Amino acid sequence: MKMNRLVKIVISIILPSLFLSGCSSPPRKIEASVPLVEASAGMDSLGQQLPLIFWKQFATQESASISDSEYTIFASKPYISALDMLCRNLIINDVNKNTRSQRVACSQVSQYELTELSPWYLMRDIKNPMSDLKL
């Protein structure tokens, strides 16, 4: 009888304290491998404001293609981002460097209020924050 009572006491006191001690240790420290994006000079909080020629081309619901002496840019059809902004995927071919990159351009204006004077922004490249692409 005393042995059963002793076993019950041990189980009811020691076993829960073992479980609770496992939860009391601090979590392991984790460091991000990608730094947070910092605002840089000459950029709006959204990113680099694109020139007016982009605004006019992006005012339609169709895909667009824009070329100048440095870049050939193909823009997909617009979509609504998770941040509720109107955006387009861009494929940018640098004619001089013979390189190709993918970026995103967004406007804070809704698709119903979009005009040729609605500003568009080249969003920052999260994967390569040191990217120096200027359109």
Image (tube, helix red, strand yellow):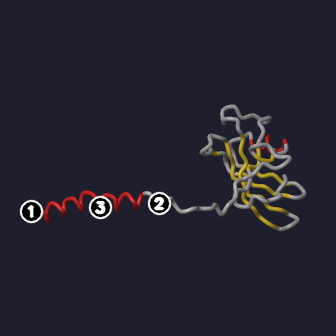
Single out the residue that lies furthest toward the left. Answer: 1
Badge 3 is on which residue?
A: 14
Residue 98 sits in which quadrant? bottom right
Q: How crowded is the residue under tag 1: few (<14 C-alpha within 10 Å), some, or many (20+)?
A: few
Residue 4, picture quadrant:
bottom left
Question: Which quadrant of the figure has residue 126?
Answer: bottom right
Q: Given the current orientation, which residue lies at the most extreme right position?
A: 69
Q: Which mark is residue 1?
A: 1
Which residue lies under the disc numbered 2? 25
**For the residues carrying marks 2 and 1, which lies nearer the camera in this image?**
1
Looking at the image, which residue is at 62% across and 45% down? 81
- Residue at horizontal 66 percent and vertical 36 percent from the top: 111
Q: Secondary structure at mark 3?
A: helix
Q: Are marks 1 and 3 in contact (CB under 8 Å)?
A: no
Determine crowd level at label 3: few under 14, some 14-19, many 20+ residues with C-alpha closer than 10 A: few
Split into 4 quadrants, where in the image is the N terminus?
bottom left
